[in-house]
Amino acid sequence: MSETKKFMYINRRPPYGTVYPLEGLEVVLIGAAFEQEVCMAFISDGVFQLKQGQDTTDTGMKNFSPTYRALGDYEVTRLYVERESLEERGLTEADLMPLTWEDEDDDWAEKPSIQIVSRTQLSDLLEEQDVVFNF
Amino acid sequence: MKLAVMVNEGPYTHQASDTAYSFIRAALDAGHEIFRVFFYHDGVHNGTRLTTPPQDDRHIVNRWSELSEAHDLDLVVCVAAAQRRGIVDPDEAKRNGKDSDNIAPGFRISGLGQLIEAGVQADRLLVFGD
């Protein structure tokens, strides 16, 4: 399998309430082994998936938010968060988990994984993709 | 064209499975190749042979099995999603200590790598369901 394609995983739902975000993340982690060009996009209520301080204790649901911190180790280093979606929900970048990855080509410098992009920029990114999953 | 299909909803509640089935039939009739059909999320419920719809309705599961046999379709049910929802083949039943299995003919249980591989190998990946 020598071909490399651009994969985008779009997350548009809140982290709990349905199993789609959790099962979507499982696809991303398995997909990371295939050495494709991977990015994730967080739009609509999907931006809540990256919110800091998630606590599911009273719901009986598994808090899977720590898994997002592992994405950098899986070389999933581009997480695009739509600015308008954040603003519409009264959120700023400071409300999100500080996710990072280590750049081996830059002396393992720690770099932020989250990039805030506009709706227009995201639309352009979407246009570039070969395979799009939507969770 | 080489096509891969992902089905994300179970039978009957949503039309996604019906639409995927109709699409695949039309694609095959038009001479396209179906590389794989991957069932994820509640889509795994398409793969239980214990389904018994009313006799005057379509039998969605049997329809998939028949299409698989007629066209040698690769119908793959995601193992992690299947375990959560109780879709079991004989190997999985033994591994997890279950007293029975329910996988329908023509379906096989495998990992998410099969979905990614389908995305890499196919010219287009089409997703049906939320």
Image (cartoon, coloured by chain):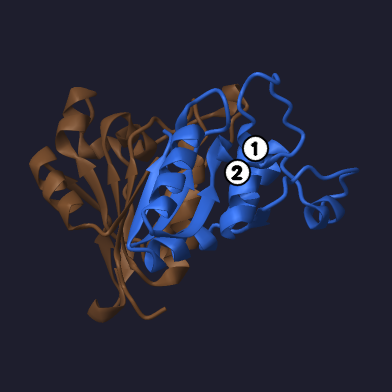
Chain colours: A brown, B blue
Q: Would you say residue B31 is visible in this rendering?
A: yes
Instruction: Measuring from the top left, give residue B74's x and y in whole percent.
Output: 57, 58
Q: Alpha-carbon neighbours of circle 2 within 10 Å: few (<14), some, or many (≥20)?
A: many
Instruction: Measuring from the top left, give residue B37's x and y in whole percent.
Output: 51, 52
The residue lying at 65 percent from left, 37 percent from top is B61
Quarter holding residue B20? top left
Chain of the residue on which disc 1 is drawn: B
Q: Both on one chain, marks 2 and 1?
A: yes
Residue nearer the viewer, B26 or A64:
B26
Name the element at disc 2: helix
Chain of the residue on which disc 2 is drawn: B
The residue lying at 58 percent from left, 48 percent from top is B67
Residue nearer the viewer, A89 or A35:
A35
Q: Quadrant of the N terminus of chain A?
A: bottom left
Q: CA distance from mark 2 to mark 1?
A: 5 Å
Q: Are marks 2 and 1 in contact (CB under 8 Å)?
A: yes
B114 relative to A119 in the view: left or right: right
Q: On residue A21, which mark appears?
A: none
Residue nearer the viewer, B79 or B38:
B38
Q: On residue B61, which mark appears?
A: 1
The residue lying at 49 percent from left, 25 percent from top is B14
Instruction: Measuring from the top left, give residue B100's x and y in whole percent.
Output: 87, 43
Residue ranking furthest to the right: B99
Q: Would you say residue B77 is visible in this rendering?
A: no
Amino acid marked by disc 1 = Val
Amino acid marked by disc 2 = Trp
Q: Is residue B119 above or below residue A4?
A: above
What residue would you read off at disc 2? B64
Residue ranking furthest to the left: A120
